[in-house]
Every structure is written in structure tokens, then in C-alpha cells.
Image (cartoon, rainbow, N blue to C red):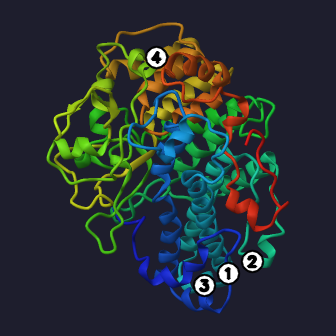
Amino acid sequence: MKKIVGYSLIALVGLLSACEKQLDQNPISGQASSDFYTSKIDFTQGVNAVYNGLKTYPDRLLNLSETRSDNLYAVSDGGVRDWEGINSFQKTIAGNVYVNEAWTGNFNAIFRANSVLEQLAARSAVIGDSALAVRFEAETRFLRAFYYFDLVRLFGKVPIIDKVVTPAESVTIGRSSVSDVYNFIISDLKFATDNLPETYAAADKGRATKYAAKGMLALVYMTRSSPTYNINGPGLALNEWSQALTLLNDIIASKKYVFGPSYADIFNYDKENNQEVIFDVQYNTGSNPVVGATFPWLLVPDNYFQAIGKTTQGGLTIRPVSNDLLNAYDPADTRKSFSVHGGFKATNGAVETRNFFKKYVDTTKVPLNRVDWPINFIVLRYTDVLMMKAECILHGAAGTQADVDAIVNQVRGRALLTPVSNVTLANLFEERRKEFAAEGSRWHDLVRSGNIESIMTTWITKEDVGKTMQPFQKNYILYPIPQSELDVKPGLYDQNPGY
């Protein structure tokens, strides 16, 4: 369904306009909210408004995970760009627009989720369908867990807000421990796995399913099991690989998803919602107001679109793919030619020799409006489930080396690469790097690998020819708490170390 992100939100604009800032918000539990939730369609719109919080998630992944990682050497030759502080590990990024968006975007969506859950508890009888009411709760709790998981991976400790609060209440809620945040996430996801359907009718395709919840919960267990690095970050060094594997095996055993023969077809505009997709962000193009995607052009220099005679997009300069990643591809790897563009001649005659990601760009589908790209963003796909299973086995969960090798060789075979044997965790993460390039997973993979300090330190030494990057330190696993949040009530939040 191409409508969830933008569906029927006009009626909610006034109701949700107070959500612009987490610590400066008006309660949604008052008369206006009660007057709104009077029918099934009102609750449908309310739940869709929670999905609407996903709209900027793909951009966030590309700005804060992909750009932060060793996949991009994102220096700019067109003036100072906001992503450069992210890429170069500057200490002064507490006011960075991407960091601010990650905090406010997630908490705005959590605020919407809490308002829906509060009204479901008080008024679900107006829906007239108890099973649908439970599904709405499960969808909303899945999404709330999704947003909190994004927050804990980016910021570590964050405030747990499980109900609609007044402005006065909001400035009394400090940051909770990472462990408590995870417990909150897991509670929501377990409810979702128990109560979401396996599939939906065509009109509702794109909503969270039981298997999307199981995949997300598996990743939560895996992330909690990663090293702590002695910071208040996403890793708790727990041994929950077997819990994750059980969930991943449930997804595989369902036979609802298929490892397709073509890598390019996974991202084909005309083959959306293919059987590789477990959960994605759905966009509605050609609507008024415009609620299409913006992520396809985010890593593409604007003069490339001009060079091929297409509409100007974001006005962005190039974020070059790192030489380290380019050299990691085998010459026969078909994923490289699909994901990476090797240069072009600009309209002014200048030749751009640096490489950039063009994974989501179909040059026959470039829209006239740069915020209306007609492509969904895949958050979780079947290949990821298979490779996460291999990761769990390598960490000691049930399975064999032969199982791991078979999974990796299935992935490599689709890329027309020769088989390998005795795959290690390091080998697996390198394969993931190429399989999921430009999908926003690399930074989180590096953190989970346990080797982010050595990998990034070595990478900076080798890649940073312009000497623009700061030395890597483990505190940079997390982003700073936005300065605007610290300023609301000094002392309520402490800043993350290193900033």
C-alpha cells in the first residue's frame, strides 16, 4: 500500500501541531483528542499518523549511519555541508540539523503513538471491532518500539515516555538507563509479535506484520548482545543470540519470503513489495500535499541529475564512496555496478571522477518534484534475516559452520561470486557491507561487530587524504544530545561524553 505514510493526515494537522518539540508540547489527551477519536476511521487515521513518523527515517539512516561509516569519505568541495561534521567526527555537532532531527523526529512519532494508545484504552469501543482495536494497539506499539530502538542506538540513554504528558511533566523526565529502554522496547515488540497478523489484504499492504516485529525483536536482542565498549551505548554484552535465532528461524519457516535471483529486482520501482521485503517505509506519490520519498537523491550530487537532463534535486554536492569500500568489491561483483556510479561529465564540462551511491535512482523515474520520488525504502529484507542468522550461529547459537557458509554463498552466488568456506564473523560483516551498501546499516553493523574502534581508526589513517577527520574514539559510537534539548531545562539531561 503506497499510502500509509501520507494517508489521511490533513484531519490531524491541527491536532498534532503541538508535537514540534518534545520538551515543549501540549497534551493531546484533552478535549480536542477525545473529540477526534469517535470512529474507526478516526483511529485508522491516528495510527497512520504514527506511521507518518517513518517518512524521514531513510534520510536519517543515510545521514547518520551510512555517512558516519567507512562507506563514505564525505568531504565536500562545495562549501561546508552538515554531513561533514558527522563524517569527520567533529565534537561540536550537538547543534547539527541531522542530530536534532533524529531526536525530535523520533519523539514526535512517540508522542503520536502515546496519544493513539491512550485513546485506544479509553475509547476503543467506538471502533466496533475488538480484533481491529487489538491490531491497532499492536501496530502502534511496534512503531513506538521502532522509534525507541532508533533512539537508543543513536543516543544511548533517553527518556522513557510511555504516556501523553504535559509540558510541566515533560521537563521532569530524565534519561533512563539503556537497559530500561530496551526492556520497554522488548515489551512493546513482544505484544506486537503476539498480536500482529502474518499478512494483510492488498489495501493494507505495508503495515507492520508479525514477522516484521519478530525481525525487529531479533535485531534488538543481537544489538543488546554486542560489546559495551565501556560506554552507555546500545551494547550490553548480553548473550541473547539464541533468542534472536529462534525469531529469525520463525521468519524463515513461515515461507512468506523468498531469496530472489536478482539483486537489482529487490529495488526495482516496478517490483515493490516483492517477496524479499519484510518491512518498508511506504510512500504515496502524486498526492496533495506531496508525501513522496526524498532519500533516493540524498547521496547523489545534483550536477549528476543536471548532466543527464533531469530536474534539479536537493542541490547537494558529492559524498564520495570511500576507496576502501570500492576496493573491497570483487571485480565480478554485480552489486558494485548496481549500487555505485563511477563518474560523469557535468553540464559545465567538468569531469567528476569520484564515485557515489546511486542505488535508488532509476533515471527513467526521476520526478518533477524532488520530494516526490516513487519508491519505498526497505527497512528489513529477507537476505538480512538470513545473514543475521549466520551471525547468531557464529556467536554460538544452534547451527553449524556449514549453515553459515551456505547462507553467505547464497548471497555471493546472486552477486556472481565464487563460493567461500569457513566464513568468520569478520568475513560475514564484510559481506554485509557490500550487500547492504547505501541501505543505512553499516554504522550499526560496525558497532555490533565489536571492532568499530580498530576498523575506523585504520580506515581514517588510510582514507583521510585531506586530513579533515578527527581521531576516532569510542564515545563517537553515540551522537550528542541536541543542544536545544539541553537548553530547555539545564541539568535535566547530561551530555554524552566526548562532546
Q: Amino acid at mark 3?
A: Ala
Badge 2 element: helix
- Residue 167 - label: 2
Residue holding disc 4: 406
Q: State the CA–CA distance, disc 2 to disc 1.
A: 6 Å
At 58% across and 65% down in the image, what residue appears? 109
Mark 2 neighbour class, 10 Å CA radius: few under 14, some 14 to 19, many 20 or more: some
Q: Amino acid at mark 1?
A: Asn
- The x, y position of residue 7, in whole percent, is 39, 72
Q: Which comes sooner in the sequence, label 2 or label 3?
A: 3
At 75% across and 38% down in the image, what residue appears? 498
What is the quadrant of the C terminus in the image?
top right
Badge 3 element: helix
Q: Which comes sooner in the sequence, label 3 or label 1?
A: 1
- Position of 220 compared to 460: left or right? right
Determine whether label 3 and label 1 are within 8 Å by CB: no
Badge 1 element: loop
Residue holding disc 1: 26
- The x, y position of residue 49, in whole percent, is 50, 71
Determine whether label 2 and label 1 are within 8 Å by CB: yes
- The x, y position of residue 128, in whole percent, is 53, 83
Q: Nearer the viewer, mark 4 or mark 2?
A: 2
Mark 3 neighbour class, 10 Å CA radius: few under 14, some 14 to 19, many 20 or more: some
Determine whether label 1 and label 4 are within 8 Å by CB: no
Q: Amino acid at mark 4?
A: Ala
Would you identify the image quadrant in which residue 340 lies? top left
Q: State the CA–CA distance, disc 3 to disc 1.
A: 26 Å
Q: State the CA–CA distance, disc 4 to disc 3.
A: 50 Å
Would you identify the image quadrant in which residue 216 lies? top right
- The x, y position of residue 421, in whole percent, is 48, 7
